[in-house]
Amino acid sequence: AQSVTQPDIHITVSEGASLELRCNYSYGATPYLFWYVQSPGQGLQLLLKYFSGDTLVQGIKGFEAEFKRSQSSFNLRKPSVHWSDAAEYFCAGLNAGGTSYGKLTFGQGTILTVHP
Amino acid sequence: DGGITQSPKYLFRKEGQNVTLSCEQNLNHDAMYWYRQDPGQGLRLIYYSQIVNDFQKGDIAEGYSVSREKKESFPLTVTSAQKNPTAFYLCASSISREDTQYFGPGTRLTVL
């Protein structure tokens, strides 16, 4: 069965430091991949998505993610974190075919804390 | 201003009561979804609908029901059969099932 794994439950960084949030996927074929962000008590906001093509994807708020097929990873990065980036981040994969066509599977989420 | 609205933001229910959560979208999306979010468990799919008058069970449909009578509306009823309904409920929509899902602001349901 397809799965998305975020190995880090909680990450703490200092404001201005770089950030990398990890995401690994397990699918029969390459899924469509997404990163969402959620502030407490709010809905999910799409940061970026990968369907095909260029493996380095740019998103909103200065975030980017790199798709690496050999490592089954889709890690999210930001060169300099701002205090307003503190939130929970979800990686998700979408089956583009097969028996679970169109099913969006979420990782468990990574909570980001930013120290001043 | 296009988007997805959910109401109410907070909902309190007594045990044994059914409650209905509203989800409306004006994005002209065909597909709509309901997810349940519990701390540390990510999001789990309750029901989805690809088109008006059609819907399918997701991974945790027991104790829930839905309808899709209009393209823009996909209400979720939490029935008394749902054993542990206290959670944060999120509605989403997409142009089609193989496209990006966009989320509403959520409804927090608490059973007293």
Image: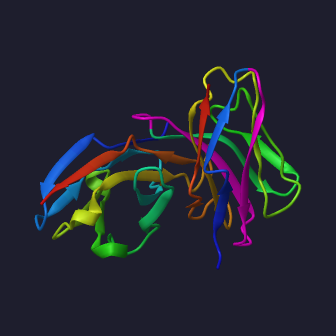
Q: Is residue B24 left or right of residue A49?
A: right
Q: Which quarter of the rendering shows the N terminus of chain B?
A: bottom right
Q: Is residue B4 left or right of residue B43?
A: right
Q: Nearer the viewer, residue B66 or A114?
A: A114
Magenta run includes residue B39: yes
Q: Nearer the viewer, residue B66 or B108?
A: B108
Q: Position of residue A37 (x, y in %)?
A: 40, 58
Q: Position of residue B112 (x, y in %)?
A: 62, 25
- Quarter residue B65 falls in: top right
Residue at x 46%, y 45% (from the top left corner) = A106
Q: Nearer the viewer, residue B50 or A85?
A: A85
Q: Nearer the viewer, residue B75 or A75?
A: B75
Kindly tell me whether residue B3 is visible in this rendering: yes
Q: Position of residue B32 (x, y in %)?
A: 70, 56
- In magenta, the rendered stretch is B16-41
Kindly tell me whether residue A99 is visible in this rendering: no
Residue at the farthest bottom position: B1
Q: Position of residue B16 (x, y in %)?
A: 75, 21
Q: Is residue A97 left or right of residue A46?
A: right
- Residue B20 sits above or below residue B104 on the image: above
Residue at x 45%, y 40% (from the top left corner) = B42
Residue at x 78%, y 64% (from the top left corner) = B72
Magenta run includes residue A96: no
